[in-house]
């Protein structure tokens, strides 16, 4: 009987070590090495058509100018939000990883896409649910397709056998942590199993030109479970975010070899599935019957998409002596910087004030163009004066109290005009070369915080 061979793998980066060590020499994390049973015989490694490719000759290097390139047509899903995030549709032969918290709607989104695709043969492989459970979910969605096939299986070799028979145009794996390959002896979900199964699926996608979607679990820190090499192996990494107790979901891309990495898709969860939100500015701004202080509207950009978002602030005297600085959806360090600018350049005594900042809609933002709206909302709450609801802001605040220009100001102005705003306040240095007459909105240009204060609150 052959001796069982074991090795140690880092759960963070996937590096292999012959013995246990406290600190990973690759990523520097502590106590991440776990022991797993491995099988090192390379002759037994297979996966997707290993025997048929064993006699294939090695590729020869070619000059770059001699390599031919043909533009491949993307597969349009019909979901405008997913197509935008992917860069215009699904690329043939691409490997896409989508991660999110349990119950956020990952399986619902992928099953909905599989049912919406017409004239496209889709194989939905589930290692977590039975065919009956998937059928019940599809009935709730009220989508029907004759080209969507469901397979409840976790062993990769059996999955590839069904792929050989069916020859699908799109493959969905739910989820990658449940798959098990016979060429690795460790348990499903371990570092070596996730790496091996992903490598087999990647080889299948590249050799056949079939796009593959992998659903992945995430850890309590918000990162995708498994080795970090999993994100390096795939072509696109999507993050499905949102509060399970709220109806809105946000689809972000953190890696995309075929498009921008700053795109954003917004969905609304209903009983019959996910509905793409084509005009997110409407849901990100709270509808109110009366004016409230501490509320300002900012024009921001997420990738190529302009959004109008509501910034809410609350400034009150510190009760316990030490003032609190709390922000939800906004960078806390940038909030502290803006408060320091208001104290130094604006003369406001915020040292003994509690400051709470909230971005409405559950969105997380990092656009510096929202600085002007953040400052305006803080001043509004501090002075207890409401801002005119017909004005929005777009500008970055410097340490000297100056209002700096932000990029793609034309898109921000056009979005504000489309949403019915009467005025937009931005930097004086951002309007150079702009034809302001073509916009159905008044542009207010300022260069310092004092000018903004005089125009809004005096």
Image (cartoon, rainbow, N blue to C red):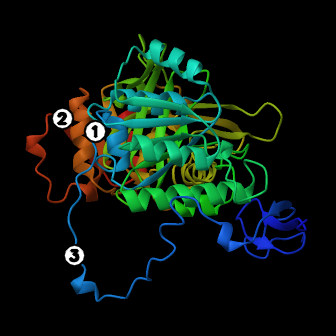
70 up-or-down from 397: above or below: below
Q: Mark 1 points at which residue?
A: 424
SS label for mark 3: loop
106 up-or-down from 433: above or below: above
Closer to the camera in the image, 175 or 2 = 2
Contact? badges 2 and 1 (CB < 8 Å): yes
The 10 Å Cα crowd at callout 1, few under 14, some 14 to 19, many 20 or more, is many
Q: Mark 2 points at which residue?
A: 441
- In the image, residue 135 lies at what x, y percent? 51, 18
Please state, as top left, top right, bottom left or bottom right, where the C terminus lies in the image: top left
Q: Which mark is residue 177?
A: none
Q: Residue at x 40, y 62 (%)?
A: 207
- In the image, residue 405 lies at what x, y percent? 33, 57
Give whichever of discs 2 and 1 has the lower sequence position: 1
Q: Residue 68 carries which label?
A: 3
SS label for mark 2: loop
Give whichever of discs 2 and 3 has the lower sequence position: 3
Please state, as top left, top right, bottom left or bottom right, where the N terminus lies in the image: bottom right
Left or right position of 99 against 388: right
- In the image, residue 9 lies at what x, y percent? 79, 65
Give whichever of discs 1 and 3 has the lower sequence position: 3
Q: Residue at x 88, y 65 (%)?
A: 4
Closer to the camera in the image, 75 or 2 = 2
Whole-Å distance between the Cαs marked 2 and 3? 49 Å
Depth check, mark 2 against mark 3: the one in front is 3
């Amino acid at each position: 009987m052959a001796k069982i061979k074991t090795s140690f793998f880092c759960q963070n980066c996937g590096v292999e070590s012959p013995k246990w060590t406290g600190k990973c020499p690759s990523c520097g994390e502590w106590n991440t090495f776990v022991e797993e049973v491995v099988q090192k015989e390379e002759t037994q490694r297979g996966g997707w058509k290993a025997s048929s490719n064993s006699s294939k000759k090695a590729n020869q290097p070619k000059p770059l100018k001699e390599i031919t390139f043909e533009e491949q047509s993307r597969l349009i899903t019909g979901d405008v939000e997913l197509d935008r995030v992917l860069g215009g549709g699904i690329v043939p032969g691409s490997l896409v990883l989508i991660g999110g918290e349990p119950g956020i709607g990952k399986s619902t989104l992928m099953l909905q896409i599989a049912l919406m695709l017409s004239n496209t043969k889709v194989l939905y492989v589930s290692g977590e649910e039975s065919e009956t459970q998937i059928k019940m979910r599809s009935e709730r969605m009220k989508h029907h397709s004759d080209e969507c096939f469901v397979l409840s299986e976790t062993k990769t070799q059996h999955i590839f056998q069904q792929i050989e028979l069916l020859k699908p145009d799109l493959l969905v794996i739910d989820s990658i942590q449940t798959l098990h390959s016979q060429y690795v002896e460790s348990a499903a979900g371990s570092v070596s199993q996730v790496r091996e199964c992903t490598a087999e699926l990647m080889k299948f996608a590249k050799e056949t030109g079939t796009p593959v979607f992998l659903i992945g679990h995430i850890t309590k820190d918000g990162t995708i479970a498994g080795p970090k090499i999993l994100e390096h192996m795939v072509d696109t990494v999507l993050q499905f975010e949102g509060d399970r107790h709220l109806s809105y979901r946000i689809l972000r891309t953190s890696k995309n070899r075929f498009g921008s990495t700053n795109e954003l898709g917004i969905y609304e969860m209903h009983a019959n599935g996910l509905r793409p939100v084509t005009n997110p500015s409407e849901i990100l701004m709270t509808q109110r019957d009366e004016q409230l202080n501490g509320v300002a509207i900012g024009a921001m950009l997420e990738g190529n998409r302009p959004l109008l978002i509501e910034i809410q602030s609350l400034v009150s005297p510190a009760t316990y002596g030490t003032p609190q600085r709390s922000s939800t959806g906004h960078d806390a360090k940038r909030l502290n910087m803006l408060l320091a600018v208001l104290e130094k350049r604006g003369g406001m005594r915020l040292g003994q004030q509690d400051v709470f900042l909230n971005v409405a809609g559950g969105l997380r933002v990092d656009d510096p163009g929202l600085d002007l709206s953040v400052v305006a909302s803080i001043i509004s709450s501090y002075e207890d004066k409401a801002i005119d609801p017909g004005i929005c802001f777009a500008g970055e605040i410097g340490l000297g109290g100056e209002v700096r220009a932000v990029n793609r100001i034309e898109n921000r102005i056009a979005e504000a005009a489309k949403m019915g705003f009467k005025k937009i306040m931005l930097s004086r240095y951002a309007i150079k070369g702009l034809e302001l007459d073509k916009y159905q909105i008044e542009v207010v240009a300022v260069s310092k915080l004092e000018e903004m204060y005089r125009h809004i609150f005096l």
